[in-house]
């Protein structure tokens, strides 16, 4: 493997954790190294990382909950850019969480994978400085419940990205306008919201 094509710290940790987790198994799951390839971050990811680069040094973000981490499109650049940040990753799919558990057990100890649903989470109030929900809210049937829980769990900010125009993804069950998002988050208790422009997406910062 050409290590220069991969995020080194995270890839190495995943491989160590994979060997630990599946040692002795006759038919272990396939390694998923392609998730850790170094590539240009998506524009919406760049925008969110840029915002975090302003608040992490200011001690406004020591802990972050990433809801629906999926394939790690945001999560792995986040861990790359902020290697000391305490990050809890929440996902409803066991195989996604199992992959992240390999990363943690292989040495990325500031990553805390969790198998849970944001709509049913029993995590205590105000557990994280920041909650991120990137390309997640459009998948969730109960928008109000998801937003309420995200706001409940955050001390300082909730950061959201959603598509801004219709697409052919059958799993996208909502299309939100800026006004839709603003109303949902203000109703859940946020003090104000700010939108940032990204082609084909809406990125919103909700302030607690």
Image: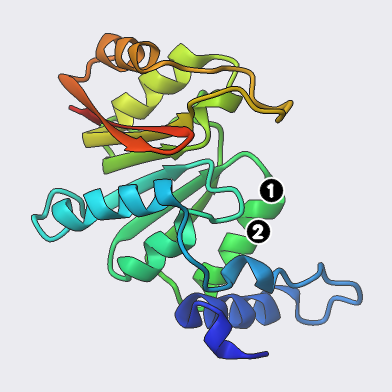
Query: Label 2 vs label 1: CA separation?
Result: 6 Å
Left or right, 154 with respect to 132, comes to left
> In the rendered view, would you say 179 is above or below 17?
above
Which quarter of the figure has residue 124? top left
Residue placed at 42% from the left, 34% from the top?
Answer: 161
Q: Residue at x 82, y 81 (%)?
A: 24
**Residue 33, percent across and down?**
67, 73
Q: Is residue 19 above or below residue 167?
A: below
Q: In this rendering, does residue 123 appear at all? A: no
Q: Residue at x 36, y 54 (%)?
A: 46
Residue at the far right in the pictured view: 26
Marks 2,1: beta carbons within 8 A: yes
| Left or right: residue 62 compared with residue 90 | left
Question: Is 25 on the left-hand or right-hand side of 179?
Answer: right
Task: Give the secondary structure at mark 1.
Answer: helix
The quarter of the picture where residue 102 lies is bottom right
**Viewer-nearest residue: 143 or 47:** 47
Category of crowding for the residue at label 1, using alpha-carbon neighbours closer than 10 angstroms: few (below 14), some (14–19), many (at least 20): few
Residue 98 visible? The answer is: yes
Left/right placement of residue 131 relative to residue 58 reads right
Q: Name the residue beneath numbered marker 2.
A: 98
- The residue identified by callout 1 is 94
Q: What x and y, as percent, mark residue 126? A: 25, 34
The colour scheme used here is rainbow
Looking at the rendered structure, the number of numbered marks drawn on it comes to 2
Q: Which residue is at the front of the view, 22 or 14?
A: 14
Quadrant assignment for the N terminus:
bottom right
Indicate the position of residue 94 as horizontal and vertical percent values: 69, 48
Disc 2 element: helix
Q: Residue farthest to the front? A: 199
């Amino acid at each position: 493997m050409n290590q220069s094509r991969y995020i080194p710290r995270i890839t190495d940790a995943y491989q160590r954790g994979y060997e630990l987790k599946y040692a002795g198994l006759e038919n272990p799951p396939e390694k998923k190294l392609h998730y850790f390839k170094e590539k240009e971050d998506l524009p919406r990811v760049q925008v969110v990382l840029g915002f975090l680069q302003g608040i992490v040094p200011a001690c406004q973000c020591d802990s972050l909950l990433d809801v629906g981490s999926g394939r790690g499109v945001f999560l792995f650049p986040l861990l790359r850019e902020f290697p000391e940040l305490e990050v809890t990753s929440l996902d409803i799919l066991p195989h996604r969480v199992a992959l992240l558990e390999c990363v943690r057990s292989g040495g990325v100890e500031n990553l805390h994978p969790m198998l849970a649903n944001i709509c049913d989470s029993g995590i205590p109030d105000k557990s994280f400085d920041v909650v991120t929900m990137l390309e997640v809210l459009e998948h969730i049937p109960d928008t109000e419940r998801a937003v309420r829980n995200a706001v409940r769990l955050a001390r300082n900010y909730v950061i959201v990205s959603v598509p801004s125009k219709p697409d052919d993804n059958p799993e996208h069950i909502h299309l939100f306008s800026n006004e839709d998002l603003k109303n949902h988050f203000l109703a859940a208790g946020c003090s104000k919201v700010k939108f940032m422009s990204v082609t084909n997406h809406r990125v919103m910062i909700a302030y607690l």
